[in-house]
Each structure stands twice: as structure tokens, then as C-alpha cells.
Image (spheres, rainbow, N blue to C red):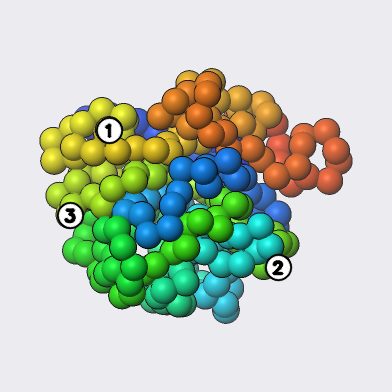
């Protein structure tokens, strides 16, 4: 569901107003059309805001935030919260393989967090991971084979074309650039915990023109909270849409029309 976020007692302005609420048992969004923006060996950066407090899983491959897979479910890229949420970020692609415990911090503490992964173009590139604007962590030999990434999704990953490894918690703004953000820009995206409109350059963030995907999870132009459709804000109304798994009316979905759920905190 798309949940309304609360204000915080601070002078700073928080851009994020809604978030995607996932129950861990079947909720996710699909953005398969975004695969057309991806190419093998490309430079890219992805930023994800998320909040969880009950991802009690023993498998580090669970708790998926963002993933890309071939049409038959082959792994292309996975970014997840590691283990039961207390060991940082899990990253995987065809070059790096499974890389767990990045950052080795508790990300399942009921507070909002931000992860940024940035890599230059080419094969076997060292990517940089930033958690909550902290010091970069290296991810060795990254090489996602995006040519086959026909299935892109948020909140789960595909195993043999079956949706699995669902995230339980809230996911906020997701942004994707076709460039490697430098450390100053990546840290600026975190902005001391205050999301802002990434379509506009601000301070040391100067990559607005490199955005190729930007989803605000319910408060972007043309977003349809009642039907679970989230539009790409780089080209709202015409760009790639995220669409909920299932429909509200089929009686089997885990989604709900409500947008007045328990308020999120810290954003």
C-alpha cells in the first residue's frame, strides 16, 4: 500500500510524502519497461530509501529492495537488506557474485535509511556503496549484464521467473542515473536524512540531467495511489510506470486502497 508519511519536528523540508508499504508476503512493484533504458556495461547509480523492522530471515538473499532479471528469472542485479536486517546491504550481479554484509550495520531498526550504489562503465568495475551518506564501501568486480534485464522490480526478486524474497517494510523514493555519481553527489543525495527533488541540481548534487528513472512512490506527477501506479518523474505521464502486483478487485492481492496507514517516522 502507499502510506502517508508524517512531518518531523525540524526546520528542514522533507520532500518525501508517501512511501510504499510492503507486507513481506507478496507485495511488490513491477517496472519491466525500464529495461529498455539499461545496457550491458553501462555506468549507473541507484538510490533507494527504505524502512523495516521485522525482516527476520536467515537467508541473505531475502529482503529484496531492487532487482533486475532475465525473462526466465536469471539474476542480473540484486540489492537487498542483508540477513535479518542487522548486517548491512547484500549486493549481487554476474561479475561480483553474492556479496553480503556490506556496511555491516543494522538497517532493520524501524528508521528510514538510504543506500546508494554507484559504478563506472565497463566490465569488472569496483562500485561504491554509501549507506546513509557514510564513507564509501567497495564492491569488487561488478558487471551486471543488463542486456537481458527484461524484468525489473521493487520489493522482490525472481527465482526461475517466480516472485520471491519479498521485502517487509516501507520503500520510499527510488532514483536511477546512467552515470556514476561521485562521492560528493552520492552523499548529497542522502542530505542528512532529508530527501529532496532530484530533478533539480542542489549543492554538490549536479546529476539531475543524468536521471533516467525517478519514482516518488505516490506523490509524483500523475501517480495514482488508488490503483498503485507510480510514474517515472523524469518524464511524468509518459515515462516508465511502476505497477502493483495484482489488482485491488481480484480478492487475492495483498494490496489495499488505503492511504491513511500508520504514519512513517523520520522522514
Sequence order check: which comes first, mark 1 or mark 2? 2
The picture quadrant where one finds residue 158 is bottom right
Look at discs 3 and 1 and give the one toward the viewer: 1
Please give the residue where the numbered disc 3 appears in the rendered image.
Answer: 183
Q: Is residue 219 visible?
A: no
Q: Are marks 3 and 1 in contact (CB under 8 Å)?
A: no
Sequence order check: which comes first, mark 3 or mark 2? 2
Please give the residue where the numbered disc 1 appears in the rendered image.
Answer: 209
Q: Position of residue 174 (x, y in %)?
A: 43, 43
Q: Position of residue 244 (x, y in %)?
A: 66, 40
Q: Residue at x 46, y 36 (%)?
A: 215
Label 1, label 2: how many angstroms apart (C-alpha)? 36 Å
Please give the residue where the numbered disc 2 appears in the rendered image.
Answer: 160
Tell me if residue 255 comes above or below residue 101 in the rendering. Answer: above
Q: Is residue 95 left or right of residue 122?
A: right
Identify the residue at the far right of this view. 251
Look at discs 3 and 2 and give the one toward the viewer: 2
Number of residues whose C-alpha sits closer than 10 Å to that of mark 3, classed few (under 14), some (14–19) or many (20 or more): some
Sequence order check: which comes first, mark 3 or mark 1? 3
Label 3, label 2: how many angstroms apart (C-alpha)? 36 Å
- Who is closer to the viewer here, 136 or 226? 136
Tell me if residue 84 comes above or below residue 191 in the rendering. Answer: below
Q: Residue at x 46, y 69 (%)?
A: 93
Disc on res. 18 = none
Amino acid at each position: 500500500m502507499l502510506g502517508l508519511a508524517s512531518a518531523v519536528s525540524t526546520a528542514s523540508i522533507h520532500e518525501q510524502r508517501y512511501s510504499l508499504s510492503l507486507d513481506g508476503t507478496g507485495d511488490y512493484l513491477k517496472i519491466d519497461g525500464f529495461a529498455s533504458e539499461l545496457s550491458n556495461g553501462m555506468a549507473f547509480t541507484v538510490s533507494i530509501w527504505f524502512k523495516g523492522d521485522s525482516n527476520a530471515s536467515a537467508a541473505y538473499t531475502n529482503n529484496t529492495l531492487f532487482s533486475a532479471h532475465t525473462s526466465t528469472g536469471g539474476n542480473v542485479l540484486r540489492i537487498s537488506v542483508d540477513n535479518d536486517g542487522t548486517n548491512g546491504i547484500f549486493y549481487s550481479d554476474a561479475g561480483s557474485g553474492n556479496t553480503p554484509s556490506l556496511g555491516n550495520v543494522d538497517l532493520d531498526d524501524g528508521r528510514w535509511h538510504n543506500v546508494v550504489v554507484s559504478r563506472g562503465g565497463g566490465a569488472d568495475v569496483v562500485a561504491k556503496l554509501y549507506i546513509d551518506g557514510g564513507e564509501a564501501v567497495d564492491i569488487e568486480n561488478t558487471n551486471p549484464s543488463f542486456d537481458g534485464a527484461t524484468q525489473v522490480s521493487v520489493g522482490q526478486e525472481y527465482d526461475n521467473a517466480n516472485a520471491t524474497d519479498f521485502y517487509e517494510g516501507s520503500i520510499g523514493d527510488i532514483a536511477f542515473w546512467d552515470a556514476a555519481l561521485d562521492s560528493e553527489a552520492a552523499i548529497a543525495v542522502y542530505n542528512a536524512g532529508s530527501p529532496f527533488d532530484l530533478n533539480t541540481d542542489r549543492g554538490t548534487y549536479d546529476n539531475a540531467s543524468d536521471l533516467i528513472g525517478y519514482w516518488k512512490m505516490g506523490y509524483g506527477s500523475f501517480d495514482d495511489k488508488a490503483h498503485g501506479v507510480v510514474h517515472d518523474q523524469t518524464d511524468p505521464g509518459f515515462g516508465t510506470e511502476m505497477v502493483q502486483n495484482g489488482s485491488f478487485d481480484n480478492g487475492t492481492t495483498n494490496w489495499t486502497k488505503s492511504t491513511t496507514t500508520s504514519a512513517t517516522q523520520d522522514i
